[in-house]
């Protein structure tokens, strides 16, 4: 083997060693990234469950608020009806009183 061939072989060997070292580093980095990805996937699943639970809680709260609102509406409606009934009773009472004691006699009623 000539001197030139030995130099080329030595250069080739050093490049192969560099490539092997790079391969090991890349493999290590890839493994680390895979672990990170697995952790992120687990975190995503936990967050999905949390979101699902939050949505269920929100729906329950909306229903509860609607029921609460409806109860207040019923109470207000009852109060309004009671007030209207009192006003109608007053009107009827006034009409009955006016029929019993007319202040202006109707023509032709004498």
Image: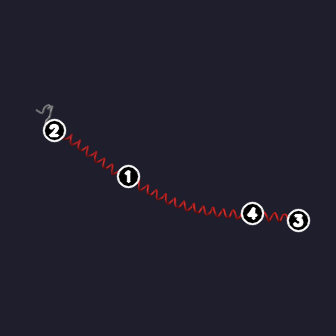
The disc at residue 3 is: 3
Question: Residue shown at 30%/47% (left/top)?
Answer: 77
Picture coordinates of residue 96, whole percent (x, y): 16, 40
Numbered disc in front, either 2 or 3 = 3
The CA span between labels 2 and 3 is 137 Å
The disc at residue 16 is: none
Side (left or right) of 62 relative to 74: right
Picture coordinates of residue 94, whole percent (x, y): 18, 38
Picture coordinates of residue 46, whole percent (x, y): 52, 61
The CA span between labels 3 and 1 is 92 Å
Numbered disc in front, either 3 or 1 = 3
Question: Residue shown at 38%/52% (left/top)?
Answer: 66
Q: Quadrant of residue 107?
A: top left
| Image quadrant in which the N terminus is located | bottom right
First in sequence: mark 3 or mark 1? 3
Residue placed under numbered mark 2 in the picture: 97
Question: Within 10 Å of the Cα at label 3, are there few (<14), some (14-19), or many (20+) other Cα atoms?
Answer: few
The CA span between labels 4 and 3 is 24 Å
Q: Please, what secondary structure does the residue beneath circle 3 have? A: helix
Numbered disc in front, either 1 or 2 = 1
Numbered disc in front, either 2 or 4 = 4
Picture coordinates of residue 97, whole percent (x, y): 16, 38
Is 60 rendered above or below residue 86? below
Residue placed under numbered mark 4 in the picture: 19
Numbered disc in front, either 1 or 4 = 4
């Amino acid at each position: 083997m000539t001197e030139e061939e030995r130099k080329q072989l030595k250069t080739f060997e050093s490049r192969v060693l560099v490539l092997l070292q790079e391969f090991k580093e890349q493999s290590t980095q890839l493994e680390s990234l895979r672990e990170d990805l697995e952790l992120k996937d687990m975190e995503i699943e936990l967050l999905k469950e949390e979101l699902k639970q939050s949505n269920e809680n929100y729906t329950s709260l909306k229903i509860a608020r609607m029921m609460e609102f409806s109860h207040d509406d019923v109470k207000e409606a009852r109060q309004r009806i009671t007030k209207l009934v009192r006003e109608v009773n007053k009107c009827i009472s006034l009409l009955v009183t006016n029929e019993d004691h007319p202040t202006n006699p109707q023509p032709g009623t004498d």
